[in-house]
Image: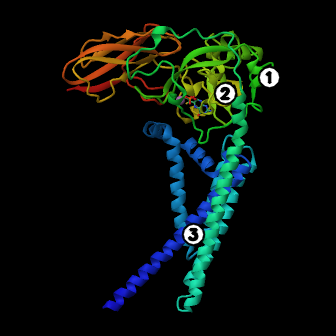
Amino acid sequence: MPGVSSFRTTLSRTTLSRAATGASAGLLAGSTALAVAELVAGLGRPASGPVTVVGGALIDRTPAPVKDFAIRTFGEDDKTVLRLGILAVLGLAAVGLGVIGLRHRRLAAAGVLLFGTVGAVAALGRPDSSGTGDALPSMAGGLAGSFALYVLLSQAAAVKAPAGRGGESAVWDRRGFLVAAGVTAVTATSAGVLGRFLSAQQGQGAGVSRDRLVLPEPSSPAPAVPAGAQSRVPGISSFLTPHRDFYRVDTALTVPRVDAATWRLRIHGKGVTRPRTYTLDQLLARPLIERDITLTCVSNEVGGPYVGNARWLGVPLAGLLREAGVRPPSHGGAADQLVARSVDGMTLGSPVEDVMDGRDAMLAVGMNGEPLPFAHGFPVRMVVPGLYGYVSACKWIESIELTTFDAYDPYWVKRAWARRAPIKTQARIDTPRPFARPAAGTVTIAGVAWAQRRGIARVEIRIDDGPWQDADLAAQDSIDTWRQWSYRWNAAPGAHTITVRATDGSGRIQTGRRAPTVPDGASGRHSVLVTVP
Ligand SMILES: Nc1nc2c(c(=O)[nH]1)N[C@H]1C(S)=C(S)[C@@H](COP(=O)(O)O)O[C@H]1N2
Ligand SMILES: [Mo]
């Protein structure tokens, strides 16, 4: 029956094109919502934009193992993946609301408002929220999106209405929808572009303040890196890590761009008899130290990439604390925990005893001869040799509070990580790479080993189940830096497992016992499987 089949085709075509109309109305309204929200955020505080605050809220609620998985799998792209994920979910929701709205226009418009409200609530819950104004971008976006969806769907309803009436008005109504869609698209695009522009403008003061910053000479310069500290073996990590290769781990979806001119550091809390607030110029006027220090992330797997070595320039932290009246617990001080807080609301807690025990704990302003890059904490961050980053290396720092471990758990400690986390001795094989196929004969195995505060005294290599053999150590720079090593191996054909272990300066051999990164750092030995053809 040709009549029926042609009827069905017409029906399904109509249904399809109706659904497509609803979906495009939804997507257009969703884009409008996001663009208007970005515009309002750009007028106020860019970090209060909906994708940023919802992403931040999700990061804070991600269980430690999942976060570790994300870092492991996506590495430093984890934030891009999260952003794209949020946009994908929003896109699907927008399509859904658009289609639902074909029948239930008010409900769909209310749905868009609900998404705006979720964003507003997330914004107010951010630790760096600066008040109710942070809810504005999401609310404005929600309202704009809701209005756009209602208008578009009204036009879409008009597209349907003329069936059975005059063909002329059907044409007119379809045009009405297209016009409304076009106006919405242009509005959304302009709002989005303008919002981006305004956000970029806001970061400019910070950029100018960084460009203008001239770092003073250190009163205590770092000794020159010993000539023999940098091995020439191809494929080994360079002794000083260039900025572009330096790992970055933080929860910031948008890198905070802090204007050095308005930046302040406040020192206060338990046992602080002289609370003080410093400007950057005041800090820079003090005697500065320059030191090579290797930074390590607790999320670094055995053999992983989250470790880097830099030349830091900064203000000794112990001196500032003493001036504020702080004494370490061993000298009767009341506070045993120093909580550093950043402009984005991150908190990190270090033992007061450690930062005052004579090690080069500092408020760093320079990294490898330059002001800190924004991603690494401009204008000021903490660096404490011997402690994992999450219990010491606060970037974009804005205050230091003296308290106790009993009284306060900082960010990561609330999320299953240990209160105290000194760095574990580790050695990493940089070359050959896993599953490499080096030719038989002499193969140079090389890598780095670290045990900040203790130094590296020995590195040994084992081929398959053979005996441990001493690797050659490159010169040691300081006990706070990693140390390169290499081993010339006479490789015979076959599959081989190369394993490495280090001994620290106190004579302790790195444990072979495997531990995951949570709660206080991975342990175990790095090994690499290669095939010699
Ligand atoms: N404000 C802030 N500071 C932070 C973090 C963070 O998430 N926010 N992460 C810490 C962690 S876990 C590490 S390992 C180091 C990493 O410093 P980097 O990114 O400069 O290598 O910064 C620390 N400082
Ligand atoms: Mo970390």
Name the kind of residue labelled 1 in the image: Pro
Q: Secondary structure at mark 3?
A: helix
Front-most of residues 480 and 485: 485
Q: Which mark is residue 340?
A: 2
Instruction: Determine which residue is flagged by label 3.
Output: 25
**Is the residue 504 above or below the residue 257 in the image?**
above
Instruction: Determine which residue is flagged by label 1.
Output: 275
Name the kind of residue labelled 2 in the image: Ala
Residue 328: quarter of image: top right
Q: Secondary structure at mark 2?
A: strand
- Identified at 53% across, 73% down, the residue is 21
**Is the residue 334 above or below the residue 111 in the image?**
above
Q: Viewer-nearest of labels 3 and 2?
A: 3
Q: What's the CA distance linking mark 3 and mark 2?
A: 47 Å
Q: What's the CA distance linking mark 1 and mark 3?
A: 57 Å
Labels 3 and 2: the sequence-earlier one: 3
Could you tell me if residue 300 is visible in this image?
A: yes
**Is the residue 488 above or below the residue 279 in the image?**
above
